[in-house]
Amino acid sequence: MYKIVLVLIMLAIQTVSAQKKPSRLSRELGIGDVVSKDSLGRAVKNLIDKPKIQDYKIISFTNDTTYVDTTLTIQKEYKFNYLRRDGFGLMPFSNMGQTYNSLTYNFQNTSLMPNFGALAKHFNYMEIEDISYYRVPTPLTELVFKSAFEQGQLADSFFTINTSPQFNFSIAYKGLRSLGKYQHILASTGNFRFTSNYQTKNKRYNARGHIVAQDILNQENGGILDSFIPNFETGDPEFLDRSIFEVQFENAESMLRGKRFHLEHSYSLVKQNDSVAKNHLSFGHVISFEDKYYQYDQTASSAFFGAAFKNSRLKDRATLENFYNQLQLNYSNNILGDLQFNISNTNFNYGYDKLVVLNGNTIINRLKGDVFAAGGKYHKQYKGFDLNGEIGLNISGDFDGNFIKAKAAFKLNDEIYANATINHSSKAPNYNTLLYQSDYVAYNWQNSFSNIETQQLAFELNYKKLANINIDYSAITDYVYFKQDQTTLQISPFQNSGTINYLRAKLENEIKVGKFSLHNTILYQNAQDSNGVLNVPELTTRNTLAFSSDLFDKALFLQTGVTLKYFTSYYMNAYNPLLAEFYVQNTQEYGGFPMLDFFINAKIRQTRIFLKAEHFNSSFTGYNYYSAPNHPYRDFTVRFGVVWNFFL
């Protein structure tokens, strides 16, 4: 991490030195000072307008373009966390860098291949869709710091520069180390990202790509012992030091590590001379390679997971190599709209380095092969409507799969926006439900599950002056989940034979009175499921009362307030550290406790400062707060952080 920060500082120094003279990039983008001579040969400095904040562009995976936002809003407060995104619907564990229990699920899907598994380790794992690209008129740096629990901190360093109007690159690293309050829950993670994008001067060739390397390490303890639960829930003063609690084990750790190389590029066969050109034809190519593994290590076997093949130095390691190629033909017409036809190949290799023979049955060690798929996309703007469609189908290979998605959006004016989406998906379950091997006897299986079938209908209404409303209904057939096996008493994957009907309705609004504001996010959920395999709280809410004001002749902007988070009691999923998966339990309900946070945030120029007293009500509203069974939520703590942007 320190080496990367040093590289960023050196780049910044070199850039500042280089900009003492107006560069070609500055002249082309109209930035900085340009020195010329008048008719008598005297030097004259011509001032060129400084770039606007809107010129610092951020381009998403779907090519949606936004710009760097240095304002201080309630949304920035919600996103200032370990994941650096809004965590509504996620219940964090006690230590930063641990996993999250999901309070809500979205079953919309456009993937044709199984996921890796070990889902509890993937909240901070950056997928292709999470990587952004940039175009900036001057070098941009962002530094983020946030204090952690006990020893350690979170730091995220980012730097991007356009070396010419055609080429941009960025480099970033997010690192965390946090010891935590309970025994043996240290978290140490790192996310390195390098991106670049390029466009020729005639704009016929475009390319963008990234390199990502990630590692997520957690010490695992299995939660506090059942015999210590009364000491926690009664608030016994002798146990307010959480390190006193005995846990299931203190000799295990899990690691998710991956690296990915991704490139997208296209070439225009028919050049667009202007924005009203009637036809545009281009070829595109996407190539992506990802190598990742999940590993669970334990120095000695634990009865918590049942019988083991050996008593010491247990090591479970699942690997996946995924190589993806897609060829695209893109055609645009001002009457027909934008069309894309694509064909793709996925070469996958998932598994282990050994065979397991259990009860006379041999469990294979690899799932590998090739899957060929075909698909298409469509986009058209017509009389105020924005129409989008996408389809995909596996045409050969070991995994069947298909999806179709259609979306229609309508913008009445700058205040009112609405859209409707329909999605059908059929996809194989995750790799770790199909094949798993472990040094623990009960955690070895090979399954032939049917595809998970989902249908979703979703609506969104956005009225800026009133509220944002999102409603979706999903029907899920042959859902695959983890639960306790009644024979082995350990956790195994199962497939639900029926159909789950799942309804969500979410309301977001803001009420302002002078310098005070009330921000509300309310989620209602109802899962009709006779087997009890999809458990969610009926009501989840987050409400923030805030005061905002400029101070000291607008040199400082202050925002302070209180946030209430709450979800109703329900059969909360439990956590299995060996699998890095949550599993269904229907014996005890959790939830129904308030979480109050008090915050004071400030903005000075491009610097945002965050100070928060988290869960300050923990000592007087009852010690019944859990992130998962046997895993208590955080006690009252005060944490500090800062986000600092540099525009050179």
Image (cartoon, grey):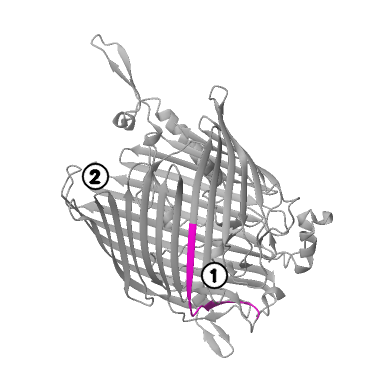
The residue that label 2 is drawn on is 203
Q: Is residue 576 visible?
A: no
The vertical placement of 383 against 288, above or below, is above
How many marks do you count on the picture?
2
In screen coordinates, is 130 left or right of 27? right
Q: How far from the left and from the top, in percent, is residue 423?
A: 37, 65
Q: Is residue 453 above or below residue 604?
A: below
Q: Quadrant of residue 19?
A: top left
The answer to whether residue 579 is visible is yes
Quarter of the picture holding the C terminus: top left
On the image, the x and y values in percent for residue 51 come to 37, 30
Helix, strand or loop under label 1: loop
Mark 1 or 2: the one toward you: 1
Q: Distance between the residues labelled 1 and 2?
A: 49 Å
Name the amino acid type tagged 1.
Leu
Question: In this view of the protein, which residue sits in the foreground, 561 or 56?
Answer: 561
Q: Which residue is drawn at 54% across and 25% down?
A: 555
Query: Which mark is on residue 534?
Result: 1
In which quarter of the view is residue 563 placed? top right
Residue 423 on the magenta segment: no
Residue type for callout 2 = Lys
Q: Earlier in the sequence, mark 1 or mark 2?
A: 2
Question: How far across and how far down the image is residue 218, in percent?
Answer: 62, 60
Q: Where is residue 245 in the image (x, y as percent from the top left)?
A: 77, 60
In the image, the segment drawn in magenta is 489-505
